[in-house]
């Protein structure tokens, strides 16, 4: 009987031992793949169709290439599939020389017969540009990024000069056009693949079973489970050391962190603000941070008195201490904003001064504008969490306190997110705490949508502020291609903003990336989605 | 015997019939359009609507449509998941094996640990060993499964870092989907790193299986112990001792067999309870089984999936229960006298 007990006691440890022992082969294999725990299902495998971060992260830089790219350090436009480009004197014609010997993915569902050439560029641009293109209405026919910029009106012609040279003609000069071609959404699709699909009667597969020229090729996708990519063996750039790239779809942020700790994920998406300390404290995890291309601000509805008076707006901004807001709401994971642009932008103006906290001056200005003590105003606090403002309600509460000290009574207003945005677009607010995340490194992406007159109609100008002088300046800036010239013009625009203060820039939030110590070469791309090309996983 | 078999088969058929009818009724009890709940196609246009009406025979009265529903169920047409747009039947056949697999391993492990422990405990009635085992089984019986699962994750995955905490096998291994049982699939496949994958799958199995085992095992210990104590107290055991047989002879030849037969049906029934627990554990360990799948379906109000999932789970439980019943009767003819079904 004793023998039996011994046998029995042997069972448990044996079960453990089976799992715990990892021999070298397992480890070797594990090193050949990278697992990224992402936050959700990509809605499409073509970022032309969906601008959500999840879709972009899953596809843009993995499956595809663009004609141009952003340098992740300087934000300048650098060559990618286009090796060089020429802009005509009048700024209306762009000529691109294309890279030769770039192969499209050769997969189980598509074998390319020819390398990448001008036809693919024409196809990719014409698809969103021309309403009568055979693929325009496949998968919905809505191309949010290009539609919002009105690019189908800006681009009037796309011509093939020869197999490796393409000419694009614009209706008006647009110095942000190159930046547009470098955004995550301007991916190059395979025209040959599209034709095959059209012939087979399954054109929608173009956006669900993607083929591109990027470093990884699509293998499989299972909803709520995973996306699997293999490395592209014929990649034109530097070859990947990882055999596989896997997106493990894990919607809960605490679950992602747990998987990162156990090593089931190598990199995770969006670590929560409250969990950052855990990542920092662990020796085997790394937390990277970088100021993101975003801004959180407090916009005054300048269409409503007394907020049409610049003195009132300035007084209110002086009454609030920005430092406290950043400490309390962003937990030091943001930098104070001096203007619309974050310091990562090439057009960042570091000569600009921040507004200083000065309640005495604020009261004085309010008196000048005829606003007595006991004045009541609304602060709308957005109900959702965004990187640029992780807790708008808390921020509003702190501001309420500050405003009371200068005799202004603030009420905090919040609705469900859909209603909130609808009423905001109707201009029912006095002031609102909200923000903006840019899609490209170009400064125009901040100046135009946030404060131009035309942005009032499209609903991104929360201040309902319209100044012809300002609009002229930002239009002028676009007509120039020289960066110094543009910078000078943007300085003048900043002067107007400082004088008028239609919105109070609060902070640029950092972007975070948490990953395991073995991962090398992963950088935060401030200009868009995550990039896994060139990421190496070292042995533990 | 044939009469008995006939009765059980009858019971099976009638129960399945009622289950199907129940699942059909669900389509009308759920909020929304019954046609959408049946087919999974939201907002059908007029033409499609007519087609669906015809397909489900909703225009031909209740019994005709019920009959039509049976035929569709048997043909494997369970509607379309509103969430993913793929066939509910396919999704069920993909997720159900994962749950069954987990339950089977937990059951086997529970039997391997629970039976011997229960026997030892029963044989050493009121001794220290008995008390020890009994108190442990009481703890195991009382601990909620979900809490234990979380605790295991905390200790073995997060603190010690020796075991993984989610899914069935690391995503690095591209296991082809054949039977849906991960170990079988790996063994059948011609993968490059089969042994490594197998080991990895084992490591993933440990925590969920153990979380399930603790409860079931405690139950088995207690059942076995009680039965062994009863048998060892009986007259024929005393008679065997009186014949001069040694203790081990008595236990092996008379005690165990007689102690185990009466509890067999109860042991088998633990499996259904285990399936229920497995569905909870799946959610915690992100195990891609039917429990996790149904929770997601409930969150997203995917009525065709909820309907299909409930039908699938209840069919498995009912068929298993009845077939085990028949099997036990075949193995132990002593209980042949109980002709009628018992609830």
Image (cartoon, coloured by chain):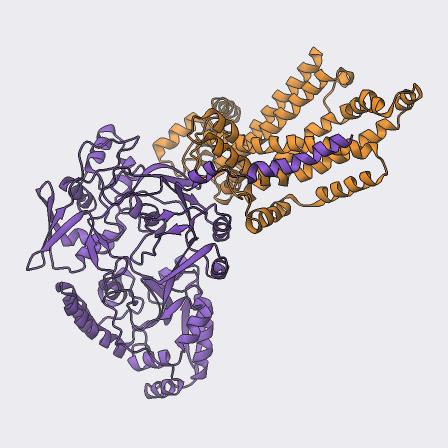
Chain colours: A purple, B orange
> Along the line of sight, which residue is nearer the eye, B145 or B243?
B243
Q: Is residue A488 left or right of residue A256?
A: left
Count of numbered badges drawn on the protein? 0
Q: Is residue A295 or residue B45 the one in the foreground?
A: A295
**Quarter-wise, where is residue B284 in the image?**
top right
Residue B116 on image: x %, y %: 74, 31
Q: Toward which corner of the image does residue A126 lie, by quadrant?
A: top left
- Residue farthest to the left, as pictured: A89
Q: Residue at x 46, y 71 (%)?
A: A328
Q: Which residue of the protein is positioned furthest toward the front in this rendering?
A: A24
Q: Is residue B44 among what the camera can see?
A: yes
Q: Quadrant of residue B328?
A: top right
x and y percentages locating residue B61 in the rendered image: 50, 26
Q: Does residue A239 appear to the left or right of B318 in the view shown?
A: left
Q: Is residue B33 visible?
A: no
Q: Nearer the viewer, residue A150 or A70?
A: A70
Q: How far across and down, in percent of the image, does residue A450 sit?
A: 28, 65
Q: Quadrant of the N terminus of chain B?
A: top right
Q: Is residue A399 above or below residue A118?
A: below
Residue at x-position 56% and y-position 47%: B157
Residue B29 in picture, x, y percent from top left: 54, 37
Closest to the observer: A200 or A31? A31
Q: Quadrant of the C terminus of chain B?
A: top right
Q: Residue furthest right?
A: B242
- The correct choice, above or below, for B73 with respect to A455 in the image is above
Residue, x 30% and y 67% (percent of image)? Answer: A342
Residue B152 located left or right of residue A427: right
Residue A378, above or below B263? below
């Amino acid at each position: 009987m004793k023998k039996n007990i011994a046998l029995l006691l042997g069972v448990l440890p044996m079960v453990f031992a089976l799992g715990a022992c990892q021999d070298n082969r397992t480890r070797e294999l594990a090193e050949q793949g990278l697992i990224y725990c992402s936050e959700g299902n990509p809605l499409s495998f073509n970022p032309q169709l969906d601008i959500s971060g999840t879709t972009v992260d899953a596809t843009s830089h993995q499956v595809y290439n663009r004609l141009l790219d952003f340098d992740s350090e300087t934000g300048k436009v650098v060559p990618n599939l286009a090796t060089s480009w020429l802009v005509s004197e009048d700024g209306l014609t762009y000529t691109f020389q294309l890279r030769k010997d770039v192969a499209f993915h050769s997969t189980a569902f598509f074998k390319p017969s020819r390398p990448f050439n001008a036809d693919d560029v024409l196809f990719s641009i014409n698809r969103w540009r021309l309403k009568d293109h055979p693929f325009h209405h496949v998968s919905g026919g809505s191309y949010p990024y290009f539609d919002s910029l009105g690019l189908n009106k800006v681009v009037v012609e796309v011509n093939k000069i020869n197999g490796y040279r393409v000419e694009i003609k614009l209706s008006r000069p647009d110095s942000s056009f190159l930046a547009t071609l470098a955004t995550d959404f301007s991916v190059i699709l395979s025209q040959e693949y599209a034709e095959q699909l059209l012939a087979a009667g399954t054109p929608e597969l173009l956006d669900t079973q993607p083929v591109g020229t990027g470093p990884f090729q699509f293998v499989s996708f299972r909803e709520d489970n995973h996306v699997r990519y293999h490395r592209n063996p014929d990649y034109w750039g530097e070859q990947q050391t990882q055999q596989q790239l896997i997106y493990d779809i894990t919607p809960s942020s605490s679950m992602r962190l747990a998987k990162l700790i156990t090593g089931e994920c190598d990199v995770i998406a969006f670590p929560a603000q409250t969990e950052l300390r855990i990542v920092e404290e662990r020796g085997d995890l790394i937390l990277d941070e970088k100021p993101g291309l975003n801004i959180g601000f407090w916009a005054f509805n300048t269409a409503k008195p007394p907020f049409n008076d610049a003195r009132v707006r300035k007084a209110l901004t002086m009454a609030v201490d920005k430092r406290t807001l950043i400490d309390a709401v962003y937990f030091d994971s943001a930098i104070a904003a001096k203007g619309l642009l974050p310091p990562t932008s090439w057009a960042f103006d570091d000569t600009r001064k921040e507004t200083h906290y000065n309640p005495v001056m604020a009261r004085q200005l309010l008196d000048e504008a005829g606003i007595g003590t006991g004045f009541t105003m609304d602060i709308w606090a957005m109900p959702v969490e965004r990187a640029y403002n992780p807790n708008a309600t808390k921020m509003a509460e702190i501001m309420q306190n500050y405003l009371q000290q200068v005799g202004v009574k603030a009420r905090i207003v919040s609705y469900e997110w859909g209603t909130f945005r609808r009423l905001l677009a109707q201009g029912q607010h006095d002031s609102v705490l909200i923000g903006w995340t840019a899609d490209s490194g170009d400064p125009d992406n901040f100046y135009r949508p946030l404060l131009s007159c035309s942005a009032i109609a499209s609903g991104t100008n929360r201040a309902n502020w319209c100044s012809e002088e300002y609009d002229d300046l930002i239009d002028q800036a676009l007509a120039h291609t020289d960066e110094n010239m543009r910078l000078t013009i943007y300085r003048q625009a900043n002067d107007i903003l400082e004088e008028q203060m239609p919105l109070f820039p609060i902070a640029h939030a950092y972007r975070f990336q948490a990953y395991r110590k073995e991962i090398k070469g992963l950088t935060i791309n401030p200009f868009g989605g995550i990039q896994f090309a060139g990421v190496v996983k070292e042995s533990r | 015997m044939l009469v008995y078999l006939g009765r059980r088969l009858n019971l099976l058929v009638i129960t399945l019939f009622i289950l199907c009818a129940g699942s059909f009724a669900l389509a009308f009890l759920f909020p929304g359009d019954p046609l959408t709940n049946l087919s999974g196609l939201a907002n059908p246009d007029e033409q499609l609507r007519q087609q669906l009406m015809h397909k489900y025979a909703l225009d031909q009265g209740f019994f005709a449509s019920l009959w039509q529903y049976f035929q569709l169920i048997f043909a494997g047409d369970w509607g379309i998941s509103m969430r993913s747009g793929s066939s509910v039947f396919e999704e069920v056949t993909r997720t159900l094996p994962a749950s069954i697999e987990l339950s089977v391993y937990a059951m086997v492990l529970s039997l391997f640990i629970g039976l011997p422990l229960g026997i030892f405990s029963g044989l050493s009635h009121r001794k220290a060993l008995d008390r020890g085992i009994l108190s442990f089984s009481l703890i195991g019986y009382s601990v909620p499964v979900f809490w234990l699962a979380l605790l295991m994750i905390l200790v073995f995955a997060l603190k010690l870092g020796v075991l993984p905490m989610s899914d069935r096998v690391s995503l690095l291994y591209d296991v082809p989907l054949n039977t849906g049982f991960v170990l079988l699939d790996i063994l059948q496949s011609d993968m490059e790193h089969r042994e490594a994958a197998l080991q990895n799958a084992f490591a993933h199995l440990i925590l969920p299986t153990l979380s399930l085992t603790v409860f079931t095992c405690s139950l088995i210990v207690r059942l076995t112990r009680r039965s062994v104590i009863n048998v060892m107290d009986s007259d024929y055991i005393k008679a065997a001792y009186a014949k001069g047989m040694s203790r081990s002879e008595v236990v092996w030849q008379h005690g165990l067999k007689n102690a185990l037969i009466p509890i067999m049906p109860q042991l088998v029934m633990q499996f259904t309870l285990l399936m229920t627990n497995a569905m909870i554990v799946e959610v915690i360990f992100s195990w891609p089984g039917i429990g996790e799948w149904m929770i997601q379906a409930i969150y997203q109000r995917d009525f065709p999936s909820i309907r299909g999932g409930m039908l699938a789970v209840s069919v498995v439980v009912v068929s298993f229960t009845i077939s085990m019943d028949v099997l036990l009767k075949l193995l132990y003819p002593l209980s042949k006298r109980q002709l009628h079904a018992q609830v």
